[in-house]
Amino acid sequence: MPAKTPVLYFDLGSPFAYLALERAEPLLGAQPELRPVLLGAIFARRGFGSWANTPARDARIAEIEQRARRYGLPALRWPDAWPTNGLIAMRCATWAQQQGHGRAFARAVFHRQFAQGADIADIAVLLDAGMQAGLERAAMRDAAESAEVKQALRDATDDAWALGVRGIPTVRIDGALFYGDDQLELAAENLAMP
C-alpha cells in the first residue's frame, strides 16, 4: 500500500462509522481503503462495550442525529432493536470486500439500517443490500457461513487491534490513528502534510 493511503476501519452496526463513511472521501480528498472489523471483539478486548447500553444512549443518539443533519444526510431512522447482533453482517462485509464490492455493500447496508430502520441481523436485509451492490445472493449467504470468511474477519480484527484500533470508526494514515467521526478533519490535515 502506498504511503499516506487512508484506511477506514468500520463495523456496520456503528452509526458513527456510517457518518464517517459518508464524509471520508470528500474530507480526505481520497477514497479510503475499507477494513471491516468486528466491533464486539474489540469491546471484549478493551473490557467495556457500547455507549448504546448505558445511560448516555439518548444523548449520543441525539448527537448523531444532529451530526447527520449538519452533514446533509437523510434523517436517521433507528432500527427498533438497535444495536443488534452484527456478526453475519460483518462476515458479509468481509466477503463483499474480497469481491471488490465492499464500499457499495457497506453504503447499502448503512442506508438500510440508519435511513430506513432495517435490522442488519436479518439476512434478507443483507442479501438485498448485496444485490444492490452487485453481489449474488446465494454466494453471499454461503460465504457468510464459510470458514474462510469467518477467519478473514477474525484476522482483520486481530490486525486492527495489533495496530492500536480501540474503537470504530478509526482512520489510519501511515502509523497515525484517528478514532471517531469527529476526527476526520484531523485525519485530512495529516493526509495533506508532506
Image (cartoon, rainbow, N blue to C red):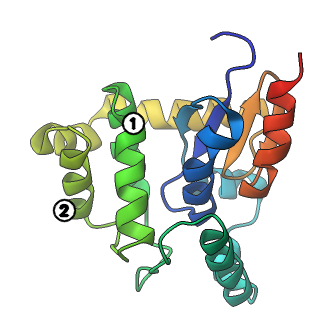
Quarter the N terminus occupies:
top right
Q: Is residue 67 left or right of residue 73?
A: right
Circle 1 packing at 10 Å, graded few (<14), some (14-19), many (20+), is many
* Tag 2: amino acid: Ala
**Which of the labelled discs sits on residue 124, or is there none?**
2
Residue lying farthest to the top in this orientation: 2
Local SS, label 2: helix
Residue drawn at the location 54% of the way across and 34% of the way down: 34
Whether residue 138 can be seen here? yes
Q: Give 144 or 102, whichever is nearer the viewer.
A: 102
Nearest to the eye among marks 1 and 2: give it: 1
Residue 174: x and y, percent? Answer: 79, 21
What is the spatial separation of the Cα atoms under label 1 and label 2, in whole angstroms?
18 Å
Whether residue 91 can be seen here? no
Residue 99: x and y, percent? Answer: 30, 26
Residue drawn at the location 76% of the way across and 27% of the way down: 173
Between discs 1 and 2, the one toward the N terminus: 1
Q: Is residue 1 left or right of residue 127?
A: right
Vertical placement of residue 76 versus 175, above or below: below
Local SS, label 1: helix
Residue 147: x and y, percent? Answer: 32, 33
Q: Is residue 28 left or right of residue 72?
A: right
- For the residues labelled 1 and 2, say whether their Cβ atoms are less than 8 Å apart: no
* Tag 1: amino acid: Gly
Residue drawn at the location 41% of the way across and 71% of the way down: 115
Which residue is label 1 attached to? 102
Vertical placement of residue 192 versus 71, above or below: above
